[in-house]
Image (tube, rainbow, N blue to C red):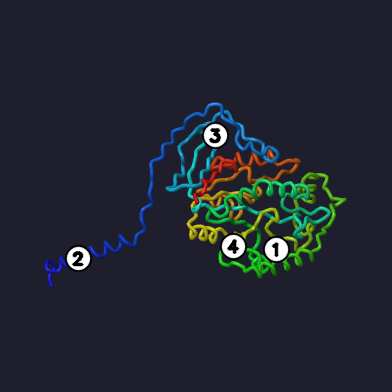
Amino acid sequence: MSLPSRLPLVLACLAVFLSSAAMTEPPAPSTRAYSNVLTPIKNPRPILADHPEFFAPIIEQAHFEAAPLVVDPDADLHVRAWRFSYNARGIIEMPNHLKAAETAVIMVHPWGIDDGQGWNTPEPAGVADFCTKEKNHLAARHTREIIRPFINSLRGRVAAVLYSLPGGKDSIRRKLYRSFTHKPTNEDRRQGALELKQKLKGFRYTGQPLPTKLTLSTRKPVVDYFRQFPGLDAGARYNNDGFWKLPIPVTADVDVHPDDVVIYDVEGYGPLKQFLAKNGVRHILLTGYATDMCFCETTAGYRNLSKDFNVFLVGDASLATFPSNTSPRHAVNAAISFAALNQLVTQVSWVKLDKTTK
């Protein structure tokens, strides 16, 4: 067959190929032109001022109102948020309108330490979480008074509630908590609770005391001093060997429901990203501890999540570590203020659900 005679057949095959390719290629992402016009806000009120015991309010001279960033069709979850820009020379506030069914609430590292479950700060010099029993109890009260009611108010409307914990999916926590791939039965949970109690109760929460004598050189005594007596040593010396291998439970100060999911840090960010995407999640309300450490850097920290999701840091539902202070209020202010350079920050009272119609 000559080329001219074959031309109609070639064109027909090409049309079929192009049509098939068009059907299999993913649709191009939709975009919109965003008007980044900033309108000064007269007499701006302090931000994150609802819980001054835990959070020193954000006070800045210049505030601006911006257009909404997230505008979902059929939005039923409204989240006012802010960020800071040195170039804009102030705080930029904007409303956002989300679909609750496409939103997840994540609590980073709700460690069940010194909460009656059996995982206790070792004596006389051990450290865990906020590093003293008194500070751990303060954080627990923050969880009970602020984070617990916040999560409970959203559960059932949002796509998922998740908690992240250190370590991997050991045999005990596998019985206690739902994960990305497994959901325990009621009997599993009952058995897991018994095994957890037995495991934690069986550990010896006693480490070595502080050293009473150090060996210092005459030339570099300061270097030698801190090398032998650092400000934080959470290893076997003070915590006893095996402390960090125990199955760390979710704190008793939140209500873990059977459908809530536990994220295990050792699994990495990939499975978390896949789970959220599979469940249609686009938005994250991030809570938990500690603002300056795990909340930022771990598997479910905002550095990971903000690469793929619309993340809102719930500022007053987090606490920073606060060495040298009896209160976290200034430490969490500083940590959130710094994060706000490249993250959106909200607060519990700025997250509002539409009422359901019966």
**N-terminal label among 1 and 2:** 2
Give residue 307's position: percent from left, percent from top: 51, 51
Q: Amino acid at mark 1?
A: Pro
Residue 41 percent location from the top left of the image: 52, 29
Query: Residue visible at 79% across and 64% down?
Result: 201
In primary-sequence order, the first of circles 4 and 1 is: 1
The residue under the point 62% across, 50% down is 295
The residue under label 2 is 12
Residue visible at 84% across and 54% down in the picture: 124
Q: Decide: marks 1, 3 in contact (CB < 8 A)?
A: no
* SS at mark 3 in the image: strand
Q: Which residue is mark 1?
A: 247
- Quadrant containing the N terminus is bottom left
Whether residue 292 appears in this view of the structure is no
| Secondary structure of residue under mark 4 | helix
Image: 50 above or below 201: above
The residue wearing badge 4 is: 267
Alpha-carbon neighbours of circle 3 within 10 Å: few (<14), some, or many (≥20)? many
User: What's under tag 3, amino acid-wise?
Assistant: Ile
Dividing the picture into quarters, in which one does residue 250 lie?
bottom right
Mark-to-mark CA distance, 4 and 1: 15 Å
Report crowding for label 2: few under 14, some 14 to 19, many 20 or more residues within 10 A (C-alpha): few
